[in-house]
Image: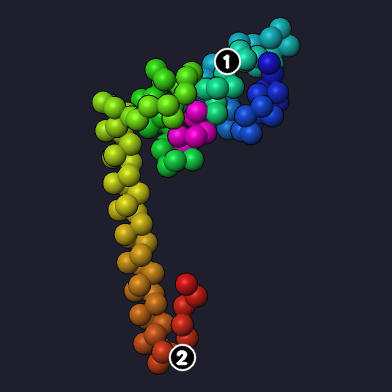
Amino acid sequence: MRIGELAEATGASPRALRHYEQAGLIASERAANGYRLYDARTVVRVRNIRHLVAAGLTLDDVRVFLPCLDGDVTASPPAGRTLEVALRRLRVLDERIAAQVAVRDRLAAALDEATGGRVRPVA
């Protein structure tokens, strides 16, 4: 299938598909006219990649899941290296959230001080 067909089947943009290919997560062959051609099984792989990215993993993180990207990645809990990667990413996200909350709290306190409490941040 061509890139547009794969995009339609998976909900990924052609740009994202090219990015996945550049990252080594999917592969294509080239037709005589230069168009990318993907195997029909790539649909499952792309859906799994999108699922993992939507869960907060980066494409570098997803690379660890390569052995199971062609099956149902949600069928069993992560184990071994995949569990380590997922836990590390969760820690990174928790740290980023904590940092953003701290910035928000400082800004809210500064606004409270500057306005004498007349302006309340929107929650």
Instruction: Measure how far apart labels 2 and 1 are at the Cα level.
Output: 59 Å
Residue pushed farthest front? 75
Determine which of the numbered discs, if any, sits on residue 41 in the image: 1
Q: Residue at x 45, y 34 (%)?
A: 52
Q: Quadrant of residue 17?
A: top right
The residue that disc 2 covers is: 118
Q: Residue at x 36, y 57 (%)?
A: 97
Q: Is residue 28 magenta?
A: no
Query: Does label 2 or label 1 sit earlier along the sequence?
Result: 1
Q: Secondary structure at mark 1?
A: loop
Q: Quadrant of residue 116?
A: bottom left
Q: Position of residue 42 (x, y in %)?
A: 57, 18
Q: Residue at x 65, y 14 (%)?
A: 37
Q: Residue at x 47, y 37 (%)?
A: 53
Which amino acid type is shown beneath numbered disc 2? Arg
Q: Secondary structure at mark 2?
A: loop
Q: Position of residue 64 (x, y in %)?
A: 36, 25
Q: Residues within 10 Å of mark 1 (few under 14, many from 20)?
A: few
Q: Position of residue 89 (x, y in %)?
A: 33, 41
Which amino acid type is shown beneath numbered disc 1? Arg
The number of numbered discs placed on residues in the rendered structure image is 2
Which label sits in the foreground, 2 or 1? 1
The answer to whether 59 appears left or right of 80 in the picture is right
Q: Which residues are magenta?
A: 48-53
Magenta portion: prevailing SS class:
helix
